[in-house]
Image: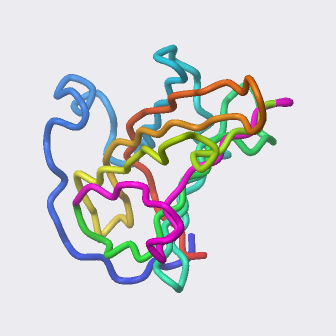
Amino acid sequence: MKRLLPLLLLPLLPGAVPARAQAALPESARLLTLRINGQPVAADTSSSRFFLGADRALRLNIVRADDPDGEGLTIIIDRFPIQAGTYGFQEILSGRNRDASYRFGTVSAYSKSCGQNTGNVTITGVNASRHWLMGTYSCQVCEAGRGGKRLTLEGTFRYPVEKE
């Protein structure tokens, strides 16, 4: 794995994963959940990737287990300060690119296609020595065009971050 830009050393905060689940998982285990409109969907932990670019843009790519070669959900948070906090989506006029897109089969949906660009990523922990982030995500994406579906995607993660 490539080296990640230096991370602030913050302790992993308890509570993001139930204590029973934390005890059962080895520290190196990847944790990644996905729910679509409240229904659990298996995530592919070997195809999913979290990237941090040289421009400090964080890109979360969460791939469905039933479509490991597909695009799945992509969330972009630019100007990511590599620290715990909540990073809400903003309209492009803010000068920040914080949005989400989702592709599965014939469905293509974007957060900017919804009336409001709602969504956020909450980082509850940064593990600098292992280059991992821990937290939650939630977003709404809408298919473009008349009668497009609105999807709510949410989940949790404890996942390694790769340098892009």
Q: How many marks?
A: 0
Vertical side of 163 occupied by 89: above or below: above
Vertical side of 164 occupied by 24: above or below: above
Please provide percent x and percent y for residue 102.
67, 41
Quadrant of res 133: bottom left
Please provide percent x and percent y for residue 112.
59, 50
Quadrant of res 126: bottom left
The C terminus lies in which quarter of the figure?
bottom right
Color scheme of the displayed model = rainbow
Q: Which residue does the image show at 67% across and 46% down from the upper left?
A: 47
Residue 64 lies in magenta, yes or no? no
Q: Which of 79 and 49 is in front in this view?
A: 79
Vertical side of 110 occupied by 9: above or below: below
Highlighted magenta segment, given as a residue range: 85-106
Residue 3 seen from this side: yes
Q: In this view, does 118 lie to the left or right of 97?
A: left
Q: In the displayed orientation, state which residue is furthest to the right.
A: 106
Q: Is residue 14 left or right of residue 98?
A: left
Q: Which residue does the image show at 30% across and 76% down from the upper left?
A: 7
The N terminus lies in which quarter of the figure?
bottom right
Q: Nearer the viewer, residue 96 or 58?
A: 96
Please provide percent x and percent y for residue 24.
28, 27
Residue 89 lies in magenta, yes or no? yes
Q: Which of 21 and 49 is in front in this view?
A: 49
Q: Is residue 24 left or right of residue 142?
A: left
Q: In the displayed orientation, state which residue is furthest to the top.
A: 39
Please provide percent x and percent y for residue 118.
43, 44
Vertical side of 131 occupied by 49: above or below: above
Q: Which residue does the image show at 51% across and 32% down from the upper left?
A: 153
Residue 48 seen from this side: no
Q: Which residue does the image show at 51% across and 14% down from the upper left?
A: 39
